[in-house]
Amino acid sequence: MDSAAEQLGRIGRFEHGFARVQATEVVDFPWGYALLQADYPASWTHNRVVVTGSVAAEEVIGVADEVLGGAGLRHRQVQFDDAGAGAAAAGAFGRAGYRNHERIVTMVHDGPLPEGDRALVEAVDFEDLRPWLIRDWRADFPDDPDHEIEQLADRVRLYERGAEVTFLAVRGRGGRVLARGELYRRDGVAQFENLITLPDSRGRGYGRALVAEALHRSADDDVRYLIAEATGWPRRWYRRLGYVDRTEVHVFQRTPGSQAIS
């Protein structure tokens, strides 16, 4: 088994390659890069700045304005891969109007495969899943225009550029998707993400079944991981399923209309 440092190196190469191959344009800097996806401007994940090296926070803020703003985007999103650098940059980003600051933890599976009712889970095609993706995004953003909601659903079509993608779901009556998740695999690295269970379907073991199915499907991969918010119950829940914390990144977001503090 790879050491923790080797795991992080492989995860980093997977994530950066996965992100860059989905972009319509990548702008490189000595300390990181900016991603642009002209076909999906509503997807902040696909239109952001990633900091991988040492740089002043003020320089990154200026680059985000220049590159993202120059592409006509109103939002700003910046990720710091180094936890210390991200924490140190928080003050500058707050003053620049970045009101949302998240800490995201990479968690690697390091235990026996969990048990779950895997018979509930099936692999589904994107076209079958798409109406349910739109439903979930509409519930989260009820005031957003339809074309932006559709972009958030359809952006998953890009994922196949960087990995083998499997959409997993638990269905109810009439084919209603009650819970879902996405498994990405490439070069011995497997990532399970976007685990969603409808509020009225929680507490029935669907999430556990999906995680178990994803881990069993990727049992031959060397590294299996996911990302979770540093705060909140899901992180503790994943630990009970055999995941351990490996590293933390900081993500700063500025929503349209947010103003810098003068």
Image (tube, rainbow, N blue to C red):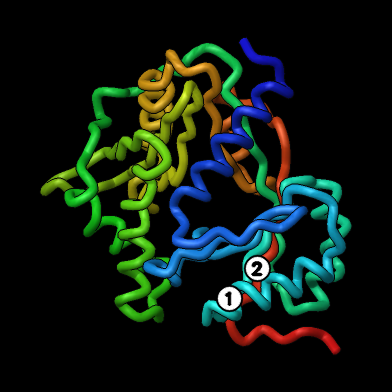
User: How many numbered marks appear?
Assistant: 2
Q: Amino acid at mark 1?
A: His
Q: Nearer the viewer, residue 207 or 145?
A: 145
In the shown orientation, is residue 69 left or right of residue 124? Answer: right
In the shown orientation, is residue 118 left or right of residue 190? Answer: left
Instruction: Please report the residue visible at 38 percent of the width from the left and 41 percent of the height from the top.
Output: 181
Instruction: Please report the residue visible at 83 percent of the width from the left and 77 percent of the height from the top.
Output: 95
Q: Position of residue 167 (x, y in %)?
A: 30, 39
In the shown orientation, is residue 5 left or right of residue 85? Answer: left
- Distance from the alpha carbon under mark 1 to that under mark 2: 7 Å
In the shown orientation, is residue 112 left or right of residue 136? Answer: right
Cβ atoms at labels 1 and 2 below 8 Å apart: yes
User: Which residue is tagged 1?
Assistant: 75
Q: Vertically, is 21 above or below 245?
A: below
Q: Quadrant of residue 186?
A: top left
Name the secondary structure under disc 1.
Answer: loop
User: Which residue is tagged 2?
Assistant: 253
Instruction: Please report the residue visible at 78 percent of the width from the left and 45 percent of the height from the top.
Output: 82
Q: Position of residue 77 (x, y in %)?
A: 63, 66
Are there few (<14), some (14-19), or many (20+) residues within 10 Å of tag 2? many
Q: Which mark is residue 176?
A: none
First in sequence: mark 1 vs mark 2: 1
Instruction: Please report the residue visible at 38 percent of the width from the left and 76 percent of the height from the top.
Output: 142
Q: Quadrant of residue 68?
A: bottom right
Q: Vertically, is 21 above or below 216?
A: below
Q: Vertically, is 171 above or below 253?
A: above
